[in-house]
Each structure stands twice: as C-alpha cells, then as structure tokens.
Image (tube, rainbow, N blue to C red):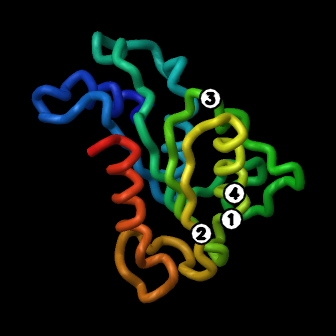
Amino acid sequence: MDAQRAVSWMRANAATLQIDPAKIAQIGFSAGANLTARTANNFKKRSYEPIDEIDAMSSRPDATLLVYPGGLLKGGFRARPTPDLAFCEDTFVVKDTPPVFIMQTEDDFCQVENSLAYYLACKKCGVPAAMLLGPKGGHGYGSRRTGRDNDTWPDVAATWLKRTLGF
C-alpha cells in the first residue's frame, strides 16, 4: 500500500518536487527489491481503498531497480525455489511491467534463481530488462564498494537508468 501510494504521491507532487512525473524509478534491496517488483507488477488495482485524488495517479513506476531480490519465487527468501521456478502469486510479469535493472551475485543467500526467473519472464513478455550478475558479493552490500565483483553495479545501473528514462 505504501509503495503504491509513494509512486502516486510523487506524480501528484511532481511540480513541487521539480521532477518529471513520467520518469519515476523505484529501487529496492533484498526485501525492498521484492516490494519493488510487487509494485511494478500490481499497479492496475490498488491494494487499498482510494483515499483522495492522489490515488487517481498511476502507481506504476517508470523503471525499477532490483538489487539482490529475494522471495520472488515460491519457497521464500532462503529456501530453494521450486523446480518450476514459479513466482509467488502477486509477483508476476506482464507486458506492462516497467523496464528493470537487476543486480545479483551467485553467492547471495537470496537465491540467484529469483533474479534469473524475473529476468527471463521480462524477456518473454517483451519488457526491457538488464541484469548484472557476478560470482561473488554476498548480500547486503548496498551501493558501497567492497572490493568484490559487485563494486561497479551503481555506475552500470546509473547508465542504464539514464538511457532507459532519457535523462
């Protein structure tokens, strides 16, 4: 509910914030990436009763960045995904899903299959998707430099975002 409201609130207040209401990106890390994916795919129906005119604005982000997402697939955050890589019921990809940049490392306890399945689902639906996959980096590094394979992701993501939203 809060994520949907936040995107709509930014659109409704774009003039005051001095932002382009057609260039709103959402980023999430770990469980926040799970929330970002759910926001990106559940924008056609509010998860709450509309409160005011803000809720008339779209809650669909124009681009999303998922950094080491977990829990997108059935089986939870740390469990091995189901063999068929089935998404949780409210995490699905459709042709209107916004473009996505995904960052993941293979040694993360949030199983890499979450990112791979989401990336492949986007490709299957024609949704622009980019994925940066490294062998080592673990979990929880955020945007700080750790000396591991994931150090370049913020720069790569910034370039992708500029190209995707036309900054």
Name the spot of residue 131 as percent of width and height, x first. Answer: 57, 59
Marks 3 and 1: in contact by CB < 8 Å?
no
Marks 4 and 3: in contact by CB < 8 Å?
no
In the image, taking residue 124 as reference, residue 133 lies left or right, namely left
Which numbered disc, 2 or 1, marks the residue closer to the eye?
A: 2
Name the spot of residue 121 as percent of width and height, x first. Answer: 70, 43
Marks 4 and 1: in contact by CB < 8 Å?
yes
Dot 3 alpha-carbon crowd within 10 angstroms: few under 14, some 14 to 19, many 20 or more: some
Dot 4 alpha-carbon crowd within 10 angstroms: few under 14, some 14 to 19, many 20 or more: some
- Secondary element under disc 3, as helix, strand or loop, is loop
Residue wearing tag 3? 95
Marks 1 and 2: in contact by CB < 8 Å?
yes
Kind of residue sitting beneath label 1: Val
Dot 1 alpha-carbon crowd within 10 angstroms: few under 14, some 14 to 19, many 20 or more: many
Residue wearing tag 4? 116
Q: 124 and 6: which one is in front? A: 124
Residue wearing tag 2? 133
